[in-house]
Structures are given as structure tokens and as C-alpha cells.
Image (cartoon, grey):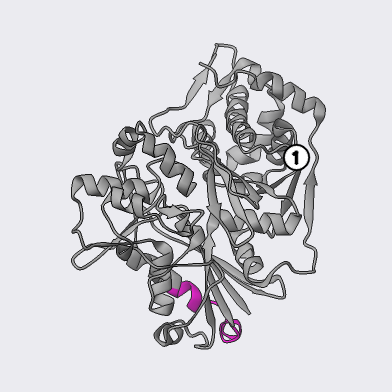
Amino acid sequence: MFLGIDIGTTAIKFAVIADGKIKFQQTSPVRTYRDQQICYQRATELLEVLKVGVQSIPKDMREALETVSFSVAMHSILPWGEGLDDAIYIWSDTQAEQTIATFKQQERASLFYQRTGTPIHAMSPFTKLLYFQQQNRYPNHTHYYGIKELIMHYFTGEFVLDYATASATGLFDLQERQWDAEILAFVGISAQQLAPLVDTTTSFPLKERAAVELKIPVTAKVVIGASDGCLAAYASYIATGIPNSLTIGTSASVRKVTKEPTFDSGKQNFCYYLNETYYVTGAPSNNGGCVLEWASHLYADTPQEFFENLPSALQHSPIGANGLRFEPYINGERAPLWQNEVTGTLKNIRIQHTKNDMIRSVVEGILFNIRTLTEMVHVTEKLSLSGGFFKSEMLRKMTADVLGVDCYLSDYNEPIMGLYYLIYGQQSTAVPIETIASSQEQYEHYTEVFKNYFSK
């Protein structure tokens, strides 16, 4: 049996898979600490949640485990050394905001992006290291790891990192598949302060102490795995045969599985390594389902009431929300703006506008923003969907109509399934897929509204 563990920024997911089918799964929340621009998790707490989660897997499945592998959230950084605390700074930490705003004006910013495929933004470990250097935050001998290295050290005794997760640090030469010496020198560290790098399917023996503590066979092998975004895209690709995918959870991301790395210095798509054959290119947004959750507190007494009434609200306001335009940048924005300071706006509001118009404008703003991302990534046909946003049938249909492409939904498109496919290959058993057809007529209506939607 295979155990996949997906360590995200809000929860750790566990799934036991055999013969391509999920036999057991559970989710455990993890705590994130916020203090103004600082955003972090605790390494000790993360490990404790992970241990309890594995221990709670049914005994017969635990004892039959043959392989364990990991998906992790991208862009984490854990300063490691004697006397340091256990804060893991995650992608949403914006301490480096001013530092990166200055750096982006330099010519080398574009050069570094072209070599790493990581957008120049406060989310990346590169920018945090640059900020730490300027602040003299840590001793010169400090090591810098992340969630994957922490987990691998617990399971195997080694600090080691896969190419996929490394390629989201802004420190990894995508072509050479090694730490970029010039970039490391620029942020004031050496490769010896980072973990050694290996490919995504590299396996390691399980440490005996971890096996005893977790009550799993010491014979189980540990496969290092990859990053959550790359694995979600790969799972969608294998499950549906479609290289293009859209995930809308709290945030959102449009991704494309390709055989060649692709860069755009102007708009700065991301381009990350997956395995010897594939790369994942795409564009992320800060403003996905979290915007709808924010609206649910404004326009209803409870989120449950809001989502129950959402289909009716959308039906009682026409396409274009009677002229209302909502720019959904309430969390700043990554692609295509890469501006933490940008804000959301509601435009053209008049006395005759209704609550239903406002709700429709919020949904349209989210989806029109996604449309800018699909155009940026050159998605022109078929799109695989995943994420909690698409639990709503109305939102699935609206997405297909706004984007003008047929969409497909499968339960087998999560990062853990991507891990399974990465290690075991595509299974012969077909998985169920829901098709959401795009209406050409609706698409044309939305296109008229979309023209100049985000213009000043």
C-alpha cells in the first residue's frame, strides 16, 4: 500500500492508495501565525500533526505500507541553527515586500527569473533571504531549509530536497538542475547552507526511530515527491488527459503541463520542474475562494446561507451585473500584476444596484481575473478543474462560460494522486469525469463585459 501525505498551508492530508484507488483519507488542520507582514508555521507543531495523522491510519493499512511520499506547499523557508526558533515562513509572508520592490528595478531581476522560473515576488525564499541579508537577521552559518527538508529529516535522518520544490525557491537553476551559484552569492549564502538536491522519484530508507514512532514497517521506502502545485497539475493531466488545469481553493492557479520550460519576462509566469519529462508552467492568484468567503460574511448572516442562496443571486442579476465591476485584489495580487499593494475595488455603483448585482459582480470579478491568467498561460481549449470553488454546479458552469472552454472535473486530481502517478505511473483503470460544456452564446456575452474590465 502507498501513503501519500500532502502538507499544505492550512491542512495536512493523508491518503492510503492501493491499485489506483483511495482506501482511506483524512485531513488535519495546521495552525498559521500572523503578525502584520510576518506569516509562519511552527516546525514542531507541523511534525506533531503529521505524526498523529499517520498514527491514526487504520492499523491493518499502516502495517501494510510499502511506500510513503510527500507533497508540500511551495515557497517555505526555515532558518535552522543553534538558538534559532522553529518558525517556517510560508509563501504569504510579505516581510520582503519593500526589498523586492527595489530589486525588481535591477536588470538582474529579469535574468534571475529567466534562470529559475520563479517570479520575482515577496513569496519566494530568494526574496526572504535577500531581506534577511539586508537586516543581518541570522548568523552567517545558518542553514536554510523548508517544509520538505524538515519532513525528510524526520523520516530519513537526512536534510534533502527535490528538484520540483527547489525550483520554486528562486535559487535553483532550472536548466542545470542545481543551486545557482551567482544567485546564492547575491543573497549571501553558499550551497552548503542548503539541502542537497535529488530528483522527485528518489527513494530513501525509512529511519527506524520514525518507523517505531509512527507504527509503520521499517521496510517501507520513502520517496521524496514534489510540490503541491506541480502534483495537482500532473494528477489532473493523468486523470483527464488534459494538460491545462485550474485550481480555485483559497487562492487560485492556472497551470499547464509541458515538455519544455516556458518563460515570459514581462508577465512572469512560473515554470517549475516536475520530472525528467515534464515541467509545469502557470500563473497564480491570491484571490480565489477567499474572496467568495469574504463576500459571504458581507452579504449573509452565515457562510452556509450565502452559498445556499448563491445560485439564486446569480440568476437574479444579468451577465455584467448591471454595470458593476469588481476588481478582486483584496489580498494584493500575484499574476499578472505581482503587486502586494494593489487593492480591490467596486466600480460604477449606483442607487439602483441590488445585493444580487453585487454578489454577481464579485463572482464575475474572480472569474474575469482567472481569464487573464488563462490568456497569459495560453489556455485555448479544455480545462481540468479542481478545488472547493467548484463544489457549486452554478460556479462550474459559469467558469466554463466565462473562459469559453469545456471544463472537466475529476475526484482524482489532488496532489496525493499526482504523487501516486509520479511513482507508479498511469493506472489502466479509468476514473469518472464530469464534463461541463461551455456555451458559445454566454461566452460572447461575457467577452463583451470582459473587454476593458480591468482598465483604469
Residue that label 1 marks: 381
Q: Is the residue 449 above or below the residue 122 in the image?
A: above
Classify residue 250 as left or right of residue 148.
right
Tell me what residue is drawn at x 45 percent, y 43 percent: 113
Q: Between residues 158 and 217, which one lies in front from this camera angle?
A: 158
Q: Is the residue 252 above or below the residue 323 in the image?
A: below
Tell me what residue is drawn at x 46 percent, y 35 percent: 333
Q: Is residue 413 visible?
A: no
Classify residue 185 as left or right of residue 23.
left
Tell me what residue is drawn at x 49 percent, y 40 percent: 286
Classify residue 216 as left or right of residue 314.
left
Q: Between residues 146 and 4, which one lies in front from this camera angle?
A: 146
Membership of 58 in magenta stretch: yes
Q: Between residues 262 and 318, which one lies in front from this camera angle?
A: 262
Q: Amino acid at mark 1?
A: Glu
Residues drawn in magenta? 51-65
Tell me what residue is drawn at x 34 percent, y 42 percent: 94
Q: Between residues 204 and 175, which one lies in front from this camera angle?
A: 175
- Where, by quadrant of the figure, is residue 111 drawn? top left
Provide the major secondary structure of the magenta segment: helix
In the rendered image, residue 261, in percent from the top left (x then y), is placed at 58, 48
